[in-house]
């Protein structure tokens, strides 16, 4: 049976059909292997496009549309809910949840949607959840009058609901302004937008980089610089001594995606949690699948990317796999590759011209990973060293490593099939928006999709939120989605990293120094495997399979093994040479074998014990939730450890993990 006769098919079915057809034909297998070895993405795409399976693929809409009948039943249920005496608040919250279900099922141009949003706003007002009420009012007041102009009765109903929302808006703004004035001891003007149009799931403000801004790296301070060599590739190096806790990168995502489990608990656009009490869920006007925290986020998402993915949204998440955890990650990567493509392909797209971005098409016209266009090479050259390196500049995405020629042909075959499938989905959506895609444009879109999939596999980072376990008092990370951070991608790997990443609202990532980084030392992140969690063999196998390099960090070269000894060894403060002497049993002065400096180990031992007590005091503060109070103590101790103790040492690792916990509490959080 042909794919055109099968109707809507999943990515799995399409992949299996095309993969089997290529694998069973030796000439096709050999031909594709040649394209793969030479990095010819265009050749890989065009070869598969010749196959009947691919030619016949015409993806139709695949999303969970509105269900007005169900919405009406849910709305009626919310009105007939009974309340037990003494349990009014719990019942009101339960009713609001039913109204939320009705909102997601209702068409935005129907009366049930109007009634449900206004009813939820009224009940939020009754619960004194004034900020939530304002967000519902914002959502209702943004609805165009044209949705309800089909009859005089509907127009009258719409006008009446608008009046109710205007009244609620004024009352809520007045209540919030009064509460804010009482809290601050003075009167301050509160704008409606400050409550309804912004949401934050962070317990702290977004940090800024420490020091003067870099002249070319827009996300970094001038304490780091970009270098390039054949062994390390592009990498970041400290231009001066960097203290622990210093903010080295504040990077915005070029594009981002949301994992399936987070679609109902996080805003699709800014990723703010929707599980806190002051959160409301705003639906997409076309589907029931995704949620937003405000009308502003819904509108921005629709105009930027969601209108191009909404009709085919189920394709990104309806894929079976024996390895569910791996597939969950991959499906988020599919959405990330798709969004990366549409964000740039449709950038500055005027609806009147219905044209795709010509620069984007030019970048992917060649499609060869080895034989790159000279003009494009010149445009991308010297970014970060002599030209501005902006994470929102597509050239920084285009430069990301893809390992196209290093991957096995079977891997590139699967990714090419995936790229063609989602390029077909995109052109199907664009055709309904009167954007015509010729065969040449389709090839460029498929080549771009393949390029992005390959880059994402070895360059994408997780967007996470942290959830505090009240039993253990530990902040545990929980994945929300994935993102492309092109500045963070400049940082190389170490199994003992000297920086740590944390997610903040709107997908922003903040990179801080975990310990002292000396001038001339490389900034090093961890790509996953850490020496105190996995053996060297496991770490190297993982890194080679995914990133195609043999790790030669200090932990791998010296084969550090965990658990480390509780015995802590001292190092010379002049030449940093390990003394190989236990300071716990130190009773006399010792001389450094390398620089011959005399070391008073007895004094150091006394200082060490006092410093360890600072860490213990910090842990006590953390246990009580005082993370800001704990950090100065931890930084004092980690400075002592960095200065006097040889690596690796258990005291340094314990302290760094405490610092990570403190910063977990300041980033994106949830319950």
Image (cartoon, rainbow, N blue to C red):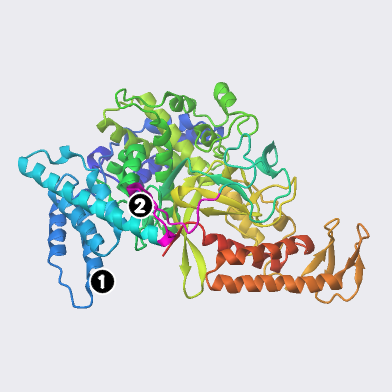
Eye-nearest disc, 2 or 1: 2
Residue beneath the point at 35% across and 41% down: 300
User: How far across and down, in percent of the image, does residue 174 sit?
Assistant: 29, 55
Label 1: element kind: helix
Which is more toward the observer, 35 or 636? 636
- Magenta stretch holds residue 552: no
Give the class, few, some or many, for how many residues have Cα within 10 Å of label 1's Cα (few <14, many ≥20).
few
Task: Inspect this view and state whether residue 264 appears.
Answer: no
The quadrant of the rendering that contains the C terminus is bottom left
Question: Mainly helix, strand or loop, the magenta region?
Answer: loop
Q: Secondary structure at mark 2?
A: helix
On the question of residue 189 being in view, the answer is yes
Q: Nearer the viewer, residue 36 or 220?
A: 220
Label 2 with label 1: CB-CB less than 8 Å: no
Left or right of residue 488: residue 228: right
Residue 384, given in percent of the width and then of the height, sits at 62, 34
Question: Residue at horizontal 64%, vertical 29%?
Answer: 386
Q: Say which mark, if any, is on residue 90.
A: 1
The residue indicated by pointer 2 is: 195
Location of residue 648 (image quadrant): bottom right
**In the image, which residues are magenta?**
183-207
Above or below: residue 165 compared with residue 418: below
State the mark number for residue 8: none
Q: Residue at x 43, y 26 (%)?
A: 361
Taking the magenta stretch, the answer to whether it contains residue 192 is: yes
């Amino acid at each position: 049976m042909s794919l055109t006769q099968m109707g809507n098919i999943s990515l799995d079915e399409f992949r299996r059909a095309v993969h089997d057809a290529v694998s069973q034909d030796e000439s096709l297998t050999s031909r594709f292997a040649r394209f793969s070895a030479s990095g010819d993405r265009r050749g890989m795409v065009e070869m598969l496009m010749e196959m009947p399976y691919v030619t016949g693929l015409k993806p139709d809409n695949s999303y969970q549309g509105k269900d007005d009948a169900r919405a009406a039943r849910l709305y009626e249920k919310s009105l007939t809910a009974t309340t037990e005496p003494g349990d009014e608040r719990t019942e009101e919250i339960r009713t609001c949840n039913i109204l939320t279900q009705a909102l997601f099922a209702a068409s935005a141009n129907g009366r049930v949607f109007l009634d449900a949003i206004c009813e939820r706003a009224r009940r939020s007002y009754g619960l004194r959840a004034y900020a939530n009420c304002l967000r519902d009012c914002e959502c209702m007041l943004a609805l165009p009058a044209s949705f309800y102009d089909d009859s005089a009765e509907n127009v009258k109903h719409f006008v009446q609901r608008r009046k109710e929302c205007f009244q609620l808006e004024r009352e809520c703004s007045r209540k919030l302004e009064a509460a804010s004035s009482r809290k601050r001891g003075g009167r301050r003007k509160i704008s409606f937008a400050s409550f309804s149009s912004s949401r934050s799931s962070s317990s702290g403000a977004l940090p800024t980089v420490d020091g003067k801004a870099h002249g070319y790296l827009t996300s970094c301070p001038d304490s780091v610089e970009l270098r390039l060599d054949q062994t390390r590739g592009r990498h970041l190096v400290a231009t001066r001594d960097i203290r622990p806790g210093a903010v080295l990168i504040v990077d915005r995502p070029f594009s981002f995606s949301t994992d399936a489990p987070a679609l109902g608990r996080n805003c699709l656009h800014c990723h703010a949690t929707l599980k806190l009490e002051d959160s409301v869920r705003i639906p997409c006007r076309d589907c029931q699948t995704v949620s937003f925290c405000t009308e502003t986020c819904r509108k921005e998402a629709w105009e930027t990317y969601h209108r191009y993915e909404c009709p085919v949204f189920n394709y990104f998440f309806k894929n079976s796999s024996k390895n569910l955890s791996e597939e969950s990650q991959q499906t988020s990567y599919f959405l990330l590759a798709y969004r990366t493509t549409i964000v740039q392909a449709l950038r500055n797209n005027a609806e009147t011209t219905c044209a795709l971005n010509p620069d984007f098409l030019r970048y992917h016209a060649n499609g060869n990973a080895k034989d790159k266009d000279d003009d494009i090479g010149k445009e991308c050259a010297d970014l970060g060293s002599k030209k501005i390196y902006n994470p929102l500049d597509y050239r920084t995405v285009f430069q990301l490593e893809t390992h196209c020629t290093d991957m096995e042909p079977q891997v590139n075959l699967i990714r090419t099939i995936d790229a063609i499938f989602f390029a077909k989905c995109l052109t199907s959506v664009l055709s309904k928006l009167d954007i015509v895609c010729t065969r040449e444009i389709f090839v460029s879109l498929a080549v771009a999709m393949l390029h992005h999939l390959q880059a994402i596999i070895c360059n994408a980072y997780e967007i996470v939120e942290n959830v505090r376990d009240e039993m253990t008092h530990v902040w545990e990370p929980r994945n929300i989605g994935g993102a492309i951070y092109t500045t963070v991608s400049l940082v190389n790997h170490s199994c003992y990293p000297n920086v740590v990443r944390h997610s903040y609202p709107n997908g922003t990532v903040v990179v801080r120094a975990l310990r002292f980084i000396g001038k001339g030392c490389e900034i090093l992140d961890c790509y996953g495997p850490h020496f105190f969690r996995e053996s060297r063999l496991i770490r190297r196998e993982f890194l080679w399979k995914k990133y195609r390099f043999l790790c030669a960090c200090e932990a791998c070269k010296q084969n550090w093994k965990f658990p480390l000894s509780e015995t802590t060894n001292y190092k010379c403060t002049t030449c940093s040479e390990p003394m190989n002497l236990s300071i716990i049993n130190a009773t006399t002065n010792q001389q450094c074998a390398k620089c011959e400096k005399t070391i008073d180990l007895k004094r150091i031992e006394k200082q060490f014990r006092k410093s360890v007590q600072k860490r213990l005091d910090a842990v006590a503060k953390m246990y009580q939730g005082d993370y800001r109070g704990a950090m100065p103590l931890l930084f004092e101790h980690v400075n002592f450890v960095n200065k006097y103790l040889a690596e690796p040492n258990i005291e340094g690792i314990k302290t760094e993990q405490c610092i990570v916990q403190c910063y977990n509490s300041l980033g994106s959080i949830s319950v």
